[in-house]
Image (tube, grey):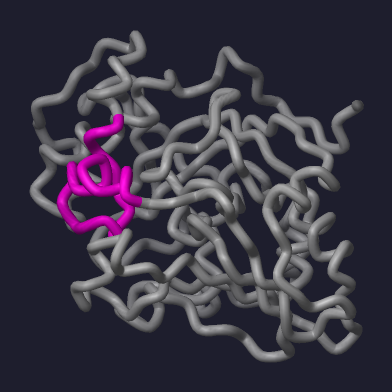
Amino acid sequence: MAKRWTNDLTHADVTPEGAFLNRRQIMAGLAGIGMAGLAAPARANTDLEPTDWDVITQYNNFYEFGTGKDDPAANAHTLTTSPWTIKIDGMVDKPGDYALDDIMSKMTIEERIYRFRCVEAWSMVVPWNGFELKDLLDMAGVKPEAKYVAMETLFRPEEMPGQNVPFIEWPYVEGLRLDEAMNPLTIMASGIYGKDIPNQNGAPLRLVVPWKYGYKSIKSVVRITLTDKEPPTSWNKAIPNEYKFYSNVNPEVDHPRWSQETERPIGGGIFAKRKPTLMFNGYEKEVASLYEGMDLRKYF
């Protein structure tokens, strides 16, 4: 089936699989999140050949399994991902609990090679497999009064031990404006590199919004709610002066603790040459019109 969206990225641009899954090993040598935007020395494997699966899954950032970099790999095996149900409710014509298998059977699955930009000022290129969120919302039937899409991560402390610690308010929640959610770039991903997403990376289904910082791409989604009010988001609730609702990649708006003007591509080692951060992560042509007339310094 022909793709409905094309881009300028190919498999030659893709971050090596080993580097993608091992990105936290690279970040672990930094002094903390406030140093993530700086070129600081660290012990890291700069070999771009894929690392052994058992090694590359030791470093990840999924706080539901703990805040340590190796906690997700140690704990994520406890997560049960099948069967999986997603509740779609709020301002929709057909609310209900949708089995993931049924959803997947109705969706058009495509490979999308996207840039991925973390708020910590590192970046990569990832080949996702998934479907446009718009198709799922159309299946449920969005009512005219809906303006926003709220999403929620699984809350299952017996399988996600990090949820037993009040690091942030659980469950993790995120949201998009409806026109952002309906944009053809916005997908729900079930695969990476042609494989199922590992538990620690957001199995079995996660959001991917390539022009926003990575934390907007909520993992292990179990609920989607259509609403007419801007929904709360986890990092905004936790640190409201640092993380706002939109979270668009913008090199002209620094994080309060570091610059966003440049980024470090993952895969070239901790001393990889930094490159300029692109407005909207390189998707300005596709999404800039969504924010026409908005003050992007105020609504960051």
- Left or right, 259 with reference to 225: left
Where's residue 300, x and y in %?
Answer: 50, 71
Task: Place residue 66 in its image quadrant.
Answer: bottom left
Q: Residue shown at 48%/56% (left/top)?
A: 219
Q: Quick check: can you spot residue 280?
A: no
Q: Quick check: can you spot residue 102?
A: yes
Q: Residue furthest front?
A: 83
Q: How many marks?
A: 0
Where's residue 142, x and y in %?
Answer: 86, 75
**Span shown in magenta:** 57-78
Where's residue 234, x and y in %?
Answer: 41, 75
Task: Place residue 63 in its image quadrant.
Answer: bottom left
Q: Residue shown at 50%/83% (left/top)?
A: 232
Closer to us: 243 or 160? 160
Q: Residue shown at 55%/24% (left/top)?
A: 193
**Above or below, 268 relative to 112:** above
State the quadrant of the N terminus: top right
- Left or right, 116 with reference to 64: right
Residue 102 is inside the magenta segment: no
Residue 73 is inside the magenta segment: yes
Where's residue 211, x and y in %?
Answer: 60, 51
Q: Residue shown at 18%/42% (left/top)?
A: 70
Closer to us: 26 or 260? 26
**Above or below, 77 relative to 238:** above
Closer to us: 264 or 214? 214
